[in-house]
Image: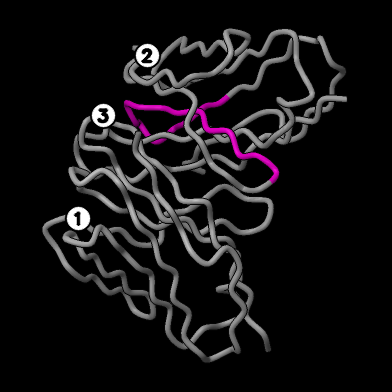
């Protein structure tokens, strides 16, 4: 299936731990994104990469570090997890940098729960 | 900064009736306005979009209107069906940033049988 996939789907961990979420797209897109959706459903962009280059870096704690080994993958590493990091994290991709009206395709989400 | 406001936050309509969701945006240079539908346990999915040079666009039971002067845009769903129940997000693409899309706060639409 052509899609944006994320692993894991659920992640439960203790405060202070370090965890990673992986994202892969096989759509041949150039741009990938990470979004955070909180319990009230607010959807906010965190990062965006175009061909492995960081192009959007919103005001997020330094504990969050995206890594793009190639244009089909964008992983999110989170250090020293805090309670407030609990949310659903969505990966997305689009063709091009977005200077055209390009649809963003979203993955199924990773529900992170920090205890 | 750029802001997108969405109303109402929840909406319940009788099956077969119409549903309307309204959004406003703050950046007058925004030029692309997508609407996403998020079903339970899934990621958002694009259902329709409109560009700033168009006032209205329709796709079967779904239509979107844009008023650039007032910086308003709306989603209209006619002849609602149970499968229309979901959370709907409006969004606006900032002209000043190539890829950044700002989402509204979402509307939870429920269709009553």
Q: Can you tell which quarter of the image residue B46 is in? A: bottom left
**How far across and down, in percent of the image, does residue B22 sit?**
40, 67
Query: Is B14 or A94 nearer to us in this picture?
Result: B14
Q: Mark 2 points at which residue?
A: A54
Q: Mark 3 points at which residue?
A: B97
Whichever of callouts 1 and 3 sits on the residue coming sooner in the sequence is: 1
Residue at 51% x, 36% y is A44
Q: Can you tell which quarter of the image residue B10 is in? A: bottom right
Using the numbered discs, state the Cα–Cα distance from disc 1 to disc 3 in whole angstroms: 16 Å
Q: Which chain carries label 1?
A: B
Q: State the mark number for residue A29.
A: none
- For label 3, the crowd category at 10 Å Cα-Cα, with few meaning under 14, some 14 to 19 and many 20 or more, is some
Q: Name the residue under label 1.
A: B51
**How far across and down, in percent of the image, does residue B40 sit?**
67, 57
Q: Can you tell which quarter of the image residue B15 is in? A: bottom right
Residue at 46% x, 9% y is A69
Q: Identify the magenta region.
A: A23-39
Question: Do the residues at pointers 2 and 3 share their chain?
Answer: no
Q: Which chain carries label 2?
A: A
Residue A44 is one of the magenta-drawn residues:
no
Residue A25 is one of the magenta-drawn residues:
yes
**How far across and down, in percent of the image, does residue B79 sit?**
47, 88
- For label 1, the crowd category at 10 Å Cα-Cα, with few meaning under 14, some 14 to 19 and many 20 or more, is some
Query: Is A54 or A62 nearer to us in this picture?
Result: A62
Residue at 84% x, 27% y is A12
> Where B17 sits versus A19, above or below?
below
């Amino acid at each position: 299936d052509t899609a944006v996939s994320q692993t894991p789907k659920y992640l439960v961990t203790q405060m202070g731990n370090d965890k990673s979420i992986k994202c892969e797209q096989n759509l041949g897109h150039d741009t990938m994104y990470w979004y955070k959706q909180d319990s009230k459903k607010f959807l906010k962009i965190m990062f965006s990469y175009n061909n492995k280059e960081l192009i959007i870096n919103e005001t997020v704690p330094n504990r969050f570090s995206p890594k793009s080994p190639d244009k089909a993958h964008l992983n999110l590493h989170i250090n020293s997890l805090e309670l407030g990091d609990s949310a659903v994290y969505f990966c997305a991709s689009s063709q091009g940098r977005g200077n055209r009206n390009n649809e963003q395709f979203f993955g199924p989400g990773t529900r992170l729960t920090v205890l | 900064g750029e802001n997108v406001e969405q109303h109402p936050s929840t909406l319940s309509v009788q099956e077969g009736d119409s549903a309307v969701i309204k959004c406003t945006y703050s950046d007058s240079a925004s030029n692309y306005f997508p609407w996403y539908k998020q079903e339970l346990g899934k990621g958002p999915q694009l259902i329709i979009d409109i560009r700033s040079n168009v006032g209205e666009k329709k796709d079967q039971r779904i239509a979107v209107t844009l008023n650039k002067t007032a910086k308003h845009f709306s989603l209209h769903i006619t002849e609602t069906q149970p499968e229309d129940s979901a959370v709907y997000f409006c969004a606006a693409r900032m002209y000043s940033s190539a890829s950044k899309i700002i989402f509204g706060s979402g509307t939870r639409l429920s269709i009553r049988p």
